[in-house]
Structures are given as structure tokens and as C-alpha cells.
Amino acid sequence: MNDYSSGTQATVLILFTTLVTVTLLMCVMAGPDRDDLTNFYTGYLTLTPFQNGLAIAGDYISAATVLSTTGIVALAGYDGYVLAVSTALSLVLLMFLLAEPLRNAGRFTMGDVLARNMPGRAVRIAACVVTLSATLPFLVVQLSGAGSLLTFILDLPHVAGARTACIVIIGSLMIIYAALGGMKGTALIQMIKIVILLFTSAVVAALVLNRFGWSPGNVLRAAQHGSGAGPAFLQQGLQLGTSAVDRLDFIGLQITVVLGVACLPHITMRLYSARDVPAVRRSMSWAVGTVTTFCLLVIIMGTGAAALVGSQYITAADPQGRTSVLMLSQVLGGAHGSAGTTILYSAVAGMVFITLLSSVAGMTLAAASSLAHDLFAHAARRGHVDPRTEMTVAAWTSVAVGTLAIGLSTLVQDWNVGVLTTLAICIGASAVAPALTYSLFWRGFTRSGLLASLYGGAACALLLMVFSKAVSGTPSAVFPNADFDLFPMQSTGLVSVPFGYLAGWLGSRLDHRRRAADSLENRRLYEESEARLLAAAE
């Protein structure tokens, strides 16, 4: 149970109600017309680079980044620092390598990019399958975590009924946001979220530094002591271990984060709402600056939690450390029940709440858009669909995706589902990243290569994850009492990422030999659009 006064609980409830009311009102006001696809998918391209940059950063910074990464920093020190840096580097990679070509090639979804030179039902279906494979695990993680976190924040009994009610409430709100708000409505929520996130995190980080006389060295020394790890807090190994295999696992995890996070469909979808290439360039500059700043604040907050709260109390509240920033705010606020504690804790709780709401809304919109646009409008009806019909389908698929995510989250709420976050990122790095880079930059890429990279990369990541240490064989695994961990790592990236690229290359080479005419046609289509794709030239 949490430990704060009834006044704090009332303040938190009032703040939550205010946030829900304001964000719902903005979604309704910004919602698209019922027959306007461009408005629903791109918000009429009316967002300024600054606004779009904040929206990209808001979608990019999920609840996992805010809570889990902060917890890893608090409990694992150096490993968490590297993870935070890798998170920022992933967006930098997107900015310099993929952002402009994606904006030039795409229209509404990732399927539009991939089907540009390789039209057909198979490509659209594959794009939809991989989009769902990457977004649905993230949704389940966010919603199942929301149940535990909201019971902690609201000081509710930590029982299945209370957690289920919290999951249903958050899930219902995410369905409404995605169905009513479209791209522009969810963008406004992301902007509100990122402003609250940066301001609150900056205040908490400043209070941490002020507590130690603005000396980072003092904070690190106190964190070493509070973590109970001593000098090992600033060395690699606390998260995954120090053996040779564990070190390879750590390297693979960082590669996966750098390649996979920014390639997730709900992130790349934001690029299509920029007006033109200069706008997407400036949007990415704002997004990278915002995310980098926040990752620095995460490092300070996580280190402060280790120093002021201590790993023993953090793990007692949550073994993964997801409540560390909340517990830190209680320590920094002052005396128990004081005005400072009430204000600071309520602000951090509001930050967590709006992060949960906005994260799941963006992912739901991406999944629903792919189902409506790629699967229904193009794969099933070959593009001959009335805009009003597609809009209606998009709204109902938001309901379907949200309902499925709520049901799955309720079923697995007692499991350690953090592995699903790793799975989603591995699919992004192993399937989406190879498909996008080959499609955008390789003239010889063919339909067979595209399908091989999408299905092969995703299947490899899923298969290895099922038989990994994250699922069985260790005390922190999903099934700690089972033992079928044939793959000796917790992240699949070291194997599945090269496999995804190799599958795309091998599929294309074999396709060239079997169907030379089709391969030449794919190459011709790429060359015709290459100038516009890479340099926005007509």
C-alpha cells in the first residue's frame, strides 16, 4: 500500500479528472470529418514543425520509457544509463537515415511505403500483420502496467478487481481518443503530455541535484550506497549479468533498441503528417532535442531514486522498479502529508497518468489505421472504398483493437509482461527496419525479399523470444517455474536482426533468378521514383 494522506489522494483524483476532461474535449474539437481520410490520417498536414516534433516525441516516449527505464537506472545503474542513451540514439538514427525518405514515400501507413514499388495484396497484408505484431504487445504491456500503477497511485487495494477496473478505464479512454481524435486529436494529447512530462521531470531532477548541492559526484556516490551494489553500480552487468553470454545479450539489446524503437509503426506514422521535407526535418530536430533532454532527466531521476529511496524499498514496491519515480517524489516533497509532498506527488502521478493515456492512444490509432487502410481498403477491396466507409471501419477497428488489448491485459495482469516490450522492439528491429531500409535504398529489392524480411524477421524474433531466458528458466521470467530456455539470452536482436536483413537479401536474390521480368519491373519503378524519394525532386 502507498503511504500518503487523504488530501493527497483527493488532489490526485481531481487532477486525473481534469486531465481526462481536457483531453477528451480537445479530441472532440480536433476530430476529423466523417468522410475526410486526409484529416483522419494526417490532420490535414496543419501541424507546425514545432507541434509535430512535440507529437513525435510524445509518441516516442512511452510509459515504458518513463517508468521502466527510470527503474532500470535506479536498480542497475550503468546498464540503465546505456539504455537511456540508446533510446535517444534510435530517434537520431531515424532523423538522419529514414525520416525524409519515409515522408516522401508514405501517405498514411507503413503499408503505403512498402507497396509504393511493390503493389499487391500480399504486401499490404504483411505490413498489417507486422504492424499488429509490433503494436499489440506494447498495448498489453502498457495496459497491464496501468492496472498496477494506478492502484499504487490511488492507494487502492492491490487486488485483481481494482487492477481490472483501472485497465478497463484506461483502455476505454484510449479507444475514444483513437476513434474520435484521429491523427490531429492524438497529436494534441501527445503535445500536452510532453509539456507536462518535461516540466515535471525537470522539477524532480532539479530537486534531486539541489538535495546534493548540485554535485553529480555526490549523487553518484549516494546512489552507489543506496543501491547496495557499491562500485558495481557504475559497471556493466547488474541488469543482465557479467558472463560472456550476458555481455553479448547486453550488446544485442542495445542494437535492438537503436534499430527498433524508432521504426515502430506508431512512430513512423507521425512523419506522414508533416507538410513537406523541410517541415519533417525541422520536426525531427525538435523531437530529437526533446527526447534527448528527457533521457538526461531520466538518468538524473533514476540515480536520485537509488540515492534517496534505495533499491531495497524500490524492489519491495515493484521488482522492476516502475514505481521508483513516484517513491522519489514522496521523499523529495518533504514531511509526510505536507503541502510540498502533496503537490509534487500529485504532479508526478498526473505525469504518469497522461503518459499512459497518450501512449496507448497512439498505438491503437496505428494498429486501427493499418487494419482499415492496408487490410480493408487495399487488400480486401483493392482501394475502391468510399472514404466514409473507410473512416467508419477505422473507428470500429479502434474499438476492436482496444477491446482485444483490454482482454489480453486483464488475463496477463499477474504476469511479468515486460518481455512483451522487448518482443515489440525486436520485431521493429528485425522485420520493420530491414523492410524499410531495403525498400527505400536498394534498387534490387523485390516483393519476395520484402515478404521474407517482414515475415522472417518477425517469426525469428517471436520464436527465439518464446525459448529465451526472459520467458522461462530464471526467477524474473514470465514462467519462472518452467525450464525451456533453449536460447540463452533475454533479447533476440543479436540473431534476429541479422536474420531479417539476410532473409530480405536472400529472397530478393532468389527472386531475381526465378522471375527476372518482375525483378526488372521493380527496379524500374524504384528508379523512376528514386529522385523524389531520396531528394524530394520532381
Image: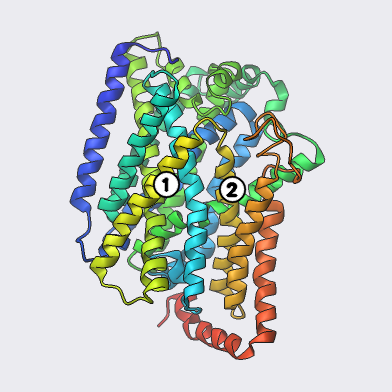
Q: SS at mark 1?
A: helix
Q: Mark 1 or mark 2, which is nearer to you?
A: 1
In the image, farthest residue toward the bottom? 517
Residue type at mark 1 is Leu
Residue behind mark 2 = 423
Residue 74 against residue 364 in the figure, above or below: above
Residue at mark 1 to residue at mark 2: CA–CA distance: 18 Å
Residue 456 percent location from the top left of the image: 64, 63
Residue 50 visible in the current orientation: no
In the rendered view of the protein, which quadrant contains the C terminus?
Answer: bottom left
Residue 341 against residue 289 in the figure, above or below: above
Residue type at mark 2 is Leu
Residue 69 percent location from the top left of the image: 54, 36
Indicate the colouring scheme: rainbow
Residue 500 against residue 421 in the figure, above or below: below
Which tag, 1 or 2, sits closer to the chain's start? 1
Q: Residue 142 sits in which quadrant?
A: top left
In the rendered view of the protein, which quadrant contains the N terminus?
Answer: top left
The residue at 39%/8% (across/down) is 336
Q: SS at mark 2?
A: helix
The residue at 63%/60% (across/down) is 457
